[in-house]
């Protein structure tokens, strides 16, 4: 069987570089293309230089040609870029793994619509450990369904542009669903001034940004007399990259459908 051909969007980004390394180190997939925005400094240079040594794949700004050369695109860029790449993937009948966060509700709808034509894994966190935490949160929320205030606290590096993180929002969604609440109606994004007492049905979000924090998430269930904290800390971006390659393999041979890492890991 031919190895799965992968194109990496946002090749020179923090995740783009990690993905190049993960793909080059995996003998079951090949780096078919690496692309970046026109004018980006690495366009025209060997993608392998981004991670150590040349690999023979030149970073291009010809997005269509890059996607055409691959079976699956892995995209960790920005919502506006991802949606352009997704449109091209749909035209060319290619699979896509989307790790980008910060989409609006309408943009998420667009992704779901495109996934009726091509197979897509769309997940705010590709790390196995975080996806295990999503399952632990289901259990915790079912047990701690009365008398416990839910707060989601996340910390990321100073360069992150969206808040709360996609992972924090998904954690909130998971807990809200188990508690029979709608996150759109019960989320509180930060507090300031005379806020009044905490309403028990709310789910609060607190965001920390600083330095090079890769990504820390805690869900706090605070009761009277005890607190439960479920925490995940990322020490490296490699688990996101390895999860993404696993997701690309999961999509191989599928014609269409919208999936997330829970599907890839068989956690549904
Ligand atoms: N699902 C998951 O497991 C994870 C998700 N993420 C998410 O992935 C995304 C990227 O994160 P990170 O790698 O740290 O970000 P970076 O800023 O380091 O990299 C983003 C890359 O995308 C490019 N880019 C930016 N805007 C566009 C655009 N409009 N069109 C095409 N390309 C564009 C950038 O190019 P340029 O430099 O020219 O702007 C850069 O190459 C974020 O949304 C982040 O939250 C991150 C880690 C894990
Ligand atoms: O921007 C990041 O770095 C990360 N983004 C994702 C998110 O928004 O949840 C995943 C991870 O936390 C790292």
Image: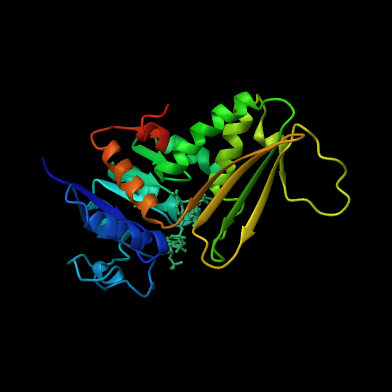
Q: Say how the picture is coloured.
A: rainbow
Q: Determine the image quadrant of residue 262.
A: top left
Query: Where does residue 98 sit, x and y in percent of width and height?
Result: 41, 47
Q: Do we see residue 253 in this rendering?
A: yes
Q: Residue at x 60, y 24 (%)?
A: 142
Quadrant for ligand 1 reads: bottom left
Q: Do we see residue 116 in this rendering?
A: no
Along the horizontal axis of the image, is 144 left or right of 230? right
Query: Where does residue 160 sit, x and y in percent of width and height?
Result: 54, 61
Query: Where does residue 59 sit, x and y in percent of width and height?
Result: 28, 67
Quarter placement of the N terminus: top left
Along the horizontal axis of the image, is 179 left or right of 50? right
Observer-nearest of 139 and 172: 139
Q: Determine the image quadrant of residue 210.
A: bottom right
Along the horizontal axis of the image, is 44 left or right of 265? left
Along the horizontal axis of the image, is 185 left or right of 77? right
Observer-nearest of 94 and 210: 210
Quarter placement of the C terminus: top left
Name of the residue lying farthest toward the left: 1
Name of the residue lying farthest toward the bottom: 41
Q: Residue at x 54, y 65 (%)?
A: 159
Observer-nearest of 81 and 132: 132
Query: Where does residue 110 sit, x and y in percent of width and height?
Result: 48, 40
């Amino acid at each position: 069987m031919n190895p799965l051909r992968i194109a990496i969007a946002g090749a020179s980004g923090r995740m783009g570089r990690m993905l190049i390394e993960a793909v080059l180190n995996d003998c079951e997939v090949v780096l078919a293309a690496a692309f970046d925005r026109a004018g980006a400094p690495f366009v025209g240079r060997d993608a392998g230089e981004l991670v150590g040594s040349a690999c023979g794949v030149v970073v291009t700004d010809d997005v269509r040609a890059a996607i055409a050369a691959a079976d699956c695109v892995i995209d960790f860029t920005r919502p506006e870029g991802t949606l352009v790449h997704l449109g091209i993937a749909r035209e060319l009948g290619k699979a896509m793994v989307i790790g980008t966060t910060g989409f609006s509700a309408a943009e998420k709808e667009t992704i779901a619509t495109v996934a009726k034509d091509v197979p897509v894994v769309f997940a705010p966190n590709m790390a196995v450990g975080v996806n295990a935490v999503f399952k632990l949160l289901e259990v915790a929320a079912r047990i701690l369904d009365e008398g416990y205030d839910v707060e989601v606290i996340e910390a990321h590096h100073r360069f992150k542009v969206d808040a709360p993180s996609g992972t924090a929002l998904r954690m909130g969604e998971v807990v809200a669903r188990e508690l029979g609440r709608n996150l759109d109606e019960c989320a509180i994004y930060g507090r300031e001034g005379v806020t009044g007492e905490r309403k028990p049905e709310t789910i609060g979000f607190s965001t920390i940004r600083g330095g090079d924090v890769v990504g820390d998430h805690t869900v706090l269930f605070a009761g009277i007399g005890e607190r439960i904290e479920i925490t995940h800390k990322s020490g490296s971006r490699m688990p996101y990259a390895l999860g993404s390659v696993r997701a690309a393999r999961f999509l191989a041979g599928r014609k269409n459908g919208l999936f997330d890492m829970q599907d890839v890991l068989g956690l549904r």
